[in-house]
Amino acid sequence: MGISDNIAAVRANISEAALRAGRTPEDVTLAAVTKFQSAERVNEALAAGVRVIAENRAQELAEKYPLLDKPEGLRIHFIGHLQKNKIKYIIDKVDMVQSVDTVELAQALSDACEKQGRELDVLVQVNIGNEPQKSGFAVSEAVSAAVEIASVPRLRLRGLMAILPLGVEKTEAMKLFSEMCKLFLDIRGKIRDNKHISILSMGMTDDYEWAVEGGSTLVRVGRAIFGERN
């Protein structure tokens, strides 16, 4: 199967998972994860109708960006751990940073946006599995951090993002997704102007169908679209 066939299969799986959960398939956005994929292969995905792509590495995005076709409606998200000194490579290229994992990073993004004269959508990354090797706010810190980041100039808080631990079974995954949903609702309740807070980014190739059943509004899928990385 080619990239377009893979995208069609992923979309069908998303639709079926949404319907199983009593949700509308259109409420779930598919983001194609483009790490280590050539611009040519990314353009194949764009030609097949993908309109959100997600990149993990700042310099890779900077190199790939001029070669992308950029159809109308394209949105580019950054989803990897972002060092403050790498912001300069992406600040004029991305529509959203999903991986805001410290207040200091939020402030640095705000400063960069000020220089660019722009605003930026952001998600707060939560370390939902409490894994020491992963970035993100601890569950106990997520609500207060989100409230603080929501007040940072030039940034527009849109919601939360999480990466589940590898190899978890469905029962445990659904518990973690449920915890993320609760945090999402808690944050909406704490922030008065919450009309923009609508995105819960959960689910990757191995668990995106469970994530849709668990309330995700955006799934980040790479391998199921592009195949195994070489």
Image (cartoon, rainbow, N blue to C red):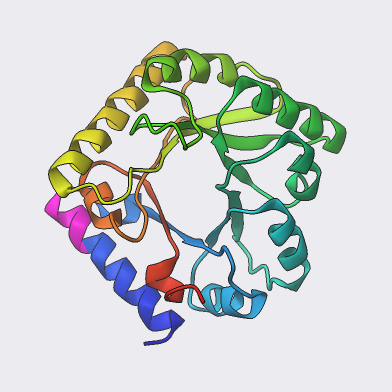
Q: Residue at x 36, y 44 (%)?
A: 202
Q: Is residue 35 above or below residue 43?
A: above
In-front residue for pair 203/92: 203
Q: What segment carries the magenta color?
A: 16-22
Q: Position of residue 26 (x, y in %)?
A: 33, 55
Q: Quadrant of residue 87?
A: top right
Q: Residue at x 13, y 54 (%)?
A: 20
Residue 94 in the magenta stretch? The answer is no
Q: Quadrant of residue 131?
A: top left
Q: Position of residue 6 (x, y in %)?
A: 37, 77
**Direction from residue 112 to residue 195 in the image, left or right:** left
Q: Is residue 188 above or below residue 33?
A: above
Magenta segment main secondary structure: helix
Count of numbered labels shown in the rendering: 0
Q: Is residue 150 above or below residue 125?
A: above
Residue 19 in the magenta stretch? The answer is yes
Q: Is residue 25 above or below residue 191?
A: below
Q: Position of residue 8 (x, y in %)?
A: 35, 75
Q: Position of residue 145 (x, y in %)?
A: 51, 17
**Direction from residue 78 to residue 33 in the image, left or right:** left
In-front residue for pair 14/79: 79
Farthest right residue in view: 115
Q: Residue at x 72, y 67 (%)?
A: 64
**Direction from residue 88 to residue 8 in the image, left or right:** left
